Amino acid sequence: MMRNLLIISNWKLNGSKYLIKNFVSNISLIVKNYNFSIVIAPPLLYLDYMQYIIQLYNCDNYISLSAQNIDTNNYGSFTGEISAKMLKDIGIKYAIIGHADRKVFHNENSSTILKKFAILKSEGITPILCIGETKTEYQANQTIVICIKQIDNIINNFGILAFKNTIIAYEPIWAINKKTVINPIYIQDVHKAIRNYLMKYNDEISKNINIQYGGSVSNENILNLLKQPDIDGVLVGRASLNISNFIKMLNVVNNFYSC
Ligand code: 13P
């Protein structure tokens, strides 16, 4: 298996220069001992600054940055937007697309996701493609059908090879920002179903692709998630904003993987 454990932290609309400095200075003391990778997605405004601080603390080999969003265009009359080309220009390696927050609050739909996916690929930035069902779809037992539909959206337009250098993040919309995480066995089943589906198209891609889980991950539940064979990492929101909490989480992961 070629998959690398990945811990992705999505700050959403949170953070400040103060938090960034504090965060990087604290993590810089431990990150070099870790045998897994960390990706942080601060608000777009702070990407360049955070990159600078990461370099200042000599952590650029250990912490990568991701955008939380991009525009569907690379340049032009699109006031207020940020392009994949700009991300590439400042050396950003990842970008989240299709996040539930974008779907719910900004009407991001399958056609926008396709455009964003294509533009990231053309700039060589790795998409972190969020997929997942609503509560109603979950209650109607439609989870796998919905996830596969969202994956087919990519396969039907770009082919299976587009999943090379792509990360899938399974984030059930109804499980985000809750008090408890859903059953890891249930999540494992969904991840397995996604991997099995990809296997029908391409064995290599299916085996190598990172399938992350996101939705109320904390330092209490992360271990039970990562023990599942098809959960290759997590996409953490709230629990990663508190530095001591996040460091605890990273240490839990590190202890588990060093055993
Ligand atoms: P929480 O960890 O706050 O539930 O957020 C998950 C998420 O949406 C990460 O992208």
Image: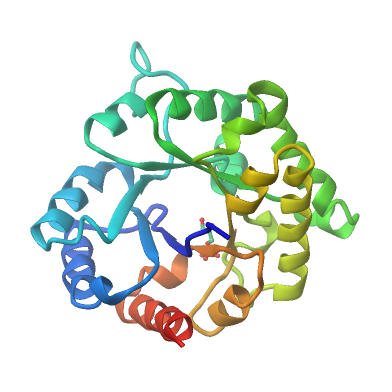
Q: For this rendering, which residue is in front, 200 or 151? A: 200
Q: For this rendering, which residue is in front, 208 or 18? A: 208
> Left of 95 or right of it: where is 167?
right
> Left of 110 or right of it: where is 77?
left
> Left of 123 or right of it: where is 200?
right
> Left of 57 or right of it: where is 149?
right
Quarter of the figure with residue 122: top left
Q: Position of residue 195 (x, y in %)?
A: 72, 52
Q: How was this image coloured?
A: rainbow
Q: Residue at x 24, y 77 (%)?
A: 30
In this rendering, does residue 83 appear at all? no
Q: For this rendering, which residue is in front, 80 or 32? A: 32
Q: For this rendering, which residue is in front, 64 or 171? A: 64
In this rendering, does residue 56 appear at all? yes
Q: Position of residue 168 (x, y in %)?
A: 59, 48
The quadrant in which the N terminus is found is bottom right
Q: Residue farthest to the right?
A: 140
Q: Residue at x 63, y 24 (%)?
A: 158
